[in-house]
Each structure stands twice: as C-alpha cells, then as structure tokens.
Image (tube, rainbow, N blue to C red):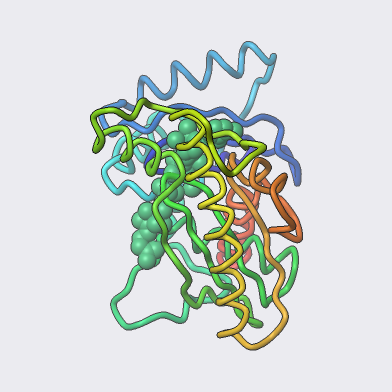
Amino acid sequence: MLLTIDCGNTNTVFSLWEHDVILQTWRTSTDHRRTADQYYVWLSTLMQVRGITADIRNVVISSTVPRVVFNLRVLCDRYFDCRPLVVGKPECRLPVPPRVEEGVRPGPDRLANAAGAFQRHGGHVVVVDFGTATNFDVVAEDGAYVGGVIAPGVNLSLEALHQGAAALPHVDISRPERVIGTNTVACIQSGVFWGYTGLIEGITQRIKAEYGRPMKVIGTGGLAALFAQAEDLFDEIEDDLTMYGLRVIHDYNTAMTI
Ligand SMILES: Nc1ncnc2c1ncn2[C@@H]1O[C@H](COP(=O)(O)OP(=O)(O)O)[C@@H](O)[C@H]1O
Ligand SMILES: CC(C)(COP(=O)(O)O)[C@@H](O)C(=O)NCCC(=O)O
Ligand SMILES: [K+]
C-alpha cells in the first residue's frame, strides 16, 4: 500500500491509498520533535480504530519543513521497511521539471499540486492552495510548474493582527454577511474574509492577463470551500489535490524504475 505524507508548516497529513483511492486521511500538527516511534504509535492506533491492516511498502513525502523529514525517513525505515520518495530531492524525479530561475527550489507542495493538476486537467491551470501561506501555483501547457504567488495565509494574518495590536482579540475566520462590521470581531472578520476574497480575485485576474490564455482555477486546502461561498472564485475545489499529485509522482518514479 502507498502512504502519501504532506507536511506543511501547520499540519502534517497522511493519506493511505488502496489502489487508486484514498482509504483514510489523518492529520496531526507539524512538530519536528515528533519521533518515528511517536508517528507510528499514532498512525497504527488510528488504523486500528478503522479496522485497517495496512501493509505499507511505499511512501512519498512532501515537506515544506525540512527538519521533519529526518524522523519521517526513520519512520519509513523502521516500520515500513522502505526508503521514501522525498519530493524536491534529486532521486525523486518529476513527470515535468519546473521552469523557474536557476537555483530556485519551489516548495514540494507546489510541485505536487502541479503534477496533480496537470494529470487531472491538462495544463493552463492556477492552483490556489490555502495553507500556512496562500499559494498560487501556475501550471503551464506541458505540466511544468512555472512560478506563481506566495501571500500570507489567512490564519497567519488573523494571528498577526492579534499579536501586533493590543486591543484586537484572536478571531476565527468566517464569512460575515456585511462588509461594514459593527463590532471589533466583525470588523476583523470582514477585513480578512473580504480582503482575501479581493486578493484571490485580483491575483487570479492578473495571472490570467499576464499568462495570456484562458486558465482553470482550482482551489485546494481547508479554507477553499469557505471562500468559494463568497464569489465565483474557483472553477473547481479539490481537497485532495496535493495528495493526488504525490500519487502521480510516485507512479511516475515507479514506472521509471521498472
Ligand atoms: N476548515 C478550516 N477552517 C478553519 N481553519 C482551517 C480549516 N482548514 C485549515 N484551517 C487552518 O488553515 C491553516 C492552514 O492549514 P493547513 O492547510 O493545514 O496548512 P499547512 O499545509 O501549511 O500546514 C491552519 O492554521 C489551519 O488551522
Ligand atoms: C510557500 C510555502 C511556505 C507554503 O507552504 P505551506 O503553507 O503549505 O506550509 C512553501 O511552498 C515553501 O516553503 N516554498 C518555498 C519557496 C517557493 O515555493 O518558491
Ligand atoms: K500545504
């Protein structure tokens, strides 16, 4: 069985695949101090709860936090008896290499998104990925990741307001009906929700204008659905896009070694 691991700056997500479908997905906070043994106890307990007896033999990792990769490698070696494919490392080949400036290392999450988006939609795609950062990943006609935009993430912005302004409380994101807030919380929610709606609209429009061809806009990450309520921001929402991209990269590497 294949395990795909998407480690972001906030959360680390594990998806277990049975053939072409994701059987289960589990999420834990990202912490580079977590050991291989801790991961395994956590993962095997969750599998037991679901009655899954998995024979994991293949693992693919995308990590935007380099430090956690060490313990994830130990997990694979000690418990799954395999060497994981780590996206961004030289031994992990990509179906289509990125076209960016010399020496730039695009986030592995962005490379996985590009691989997944190309497989599903062909090229000419913008992926809007709501994580710790809000990323826009541009995928060209041939499937190459060709760059994009990195904006501060929604929760990071909310947290920054709280940290930086003594009188502003911590607020959770939600969609306010009105733009003009009549209390502090409503004002913050409006600023962040409608502010990000404008950011997504504005940046996708500018990307399309610069790219010069019609493009599909795919939203992914936990908050995509919330923003989709606001306006017509996305052509599709695909929560599993990064995981699917990891699977595509795995299949490509397997085919190359046969
Ligand atoms: N459905 C949701 N509602 C509210 N916040 C969410 C939701 N999904 C994710 N988040 C928040 O969005 C932020 C980014 O989440 P995540 O996608 O896990 O980021 P990363 O991939 O960078 O680790 C986190 O602060 C997380 O708590
Ligand atoms: C922009 C990111 C921090 C987003 O990561 P995430 O929000 O998923 O943790 C990540 O893609 C990254 O570290 N990128 C490296 C720089 C680049 O992509 O150009
Ligand atoms: K991510």
Judge left or right: residue 76 versus residue 122: left
Which residue is painted at 67% across and 69% down in the image? 118
Q: Nearer the viewer, residue 246 or 253?
A: 246
The answer to whether residue 203 is visible is yes
Q: Nearer the viewer, residue 6 or 1?
A: 6
Identify the image quadrant of the C terminus: bottom right
* Rendering quarter of residue 205: bottom right
Q: Position of residue 182 (x, y in %)?
A: 52, 31
Judge left or right: residue 99 versus residue 206: left
Which residue is painted at 41% across and 80% down in the image? 100
The answer to whether residue 80 is visible is no
* Rendering quarter of residue 203: bottom right
Q: Position of residue 195 (x, y in %)?
A: 51, 52
In this rendering, is residue 214 above or below 61?
Answer: below
Identify the image quadrant of the N terminus: top right
Q: Position of residue 126 (x, y in %)?
A: 61, 68
Which residue is painted at 23% across and 29% down in the image? 166
In this rendering, is residue 223 above or below 121?
Answer: above
Which residue is painted at 29% across and 48% down in the image? 66
In this rendering, is residue 8 above or below 102?
Answer: above
Q: Position of residue 23 (x, y in %)?
A: 71, 32
